[in-house]
Amino acid sequence: MQSHLAKSSDPCQPDKKLRTKGDTTVAKGYWIGRVDVQDIEQYKNYVAANAKPFADYGGQFLIRGGQFENPEGTSRARNVVIEFPSYQAAMDCYNSADYQAAKALRDPVSTGDIVIVEGYDG
């Protein structure tokens, strides 16, 4: 794969160095999730149900729980970062029927935040 610079439309962001494959520019996509779980037993149903859409869209956990510090802002008890082969794959996974069904299991037993972000290879 080659890399090239893509001009950013955000003046606060530097130009991005993106991976290219043929004529297609590909930037990885990431989910950044923070969650507080109120019912761990019921939350396990969500964990089991999200495995299929994550596999279908190439999602891989980079961070799943673990020790953390929160030197600024607010935090939640659990943090995850999931990498996808592209930003589009990350969006498609979130919007898929399979993930939305899993999310329906998560919503009543947890409070969380998910940000879907395009990667930077600079």
Image (cartoon, rainbow, N blue to C red):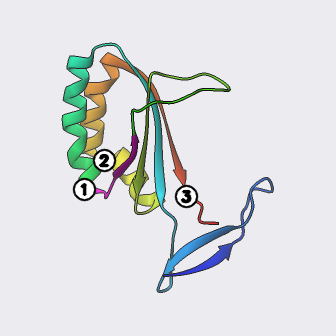
Camera-side residue: 2 or 97? Answer: 2
Which residue ends up furthest to the bottom in the rendered image? 22
Rendered position, 19 above or below 51: below
Residue 6 found in image quarter: bottom right
Q: Quadrant of residue 35?
A: top left
- In-front residue for pair 94/67: 67
Q: Is residue 76 magenta?
A: no
Which of labels 1 and 3 is toward the front?
3
**Mark earlier in primary sequence (2, 3):** 2
Q: Identify residue for label 3.
A: 119
Crowd around label 2: few <14 · some 14–19 · many ≥20 (10 Å): some
Q: Earlier in the sequence, mark 1 or mark 2?
A: 1
For the residue marked with disc 1, what is the amino acid?
Asp
Left/right placement of residue 98 relative to residue 37 reads left
User: Does 98 sit above or below residue 9?
Assistant: above
* Residue named by callout 2: 96
Q: CA distance from mark 1 to mark 3?
A: 20 Å
- Please give the name of the residue rendered at 44% of the width and 62% of the height, measured from the top-left corner: 86
Q: Which residue is mark 1?
A: 56
Under mark 3, the amino acid is Gly
Q: Residue at x 19, y 28 (%)?
A: 45
Structural distance between the alpha carbons of marks 2 and 3: 21 Å
Q: Residue at x 22, y 44 (%)?
A: 51
Image coords of residue 73 (percent x, y): 66, 24
Q: Residue at x 45, y 25 (%)?
A: 112
Q: Are marks 1 and 2 in contact (CB under 8 Å)?
A: yes
Span highlighted in magenta in the image: 57-63
Q: Judging from the image, what secondary structure is the residue with disc 3 in?
A: loop
Q: Earlier in the sequence, mark 1 or mark 3?
A: 1
- Relative vertical location of residue 16 with respect to residue 63 in this rendering, above or below: below
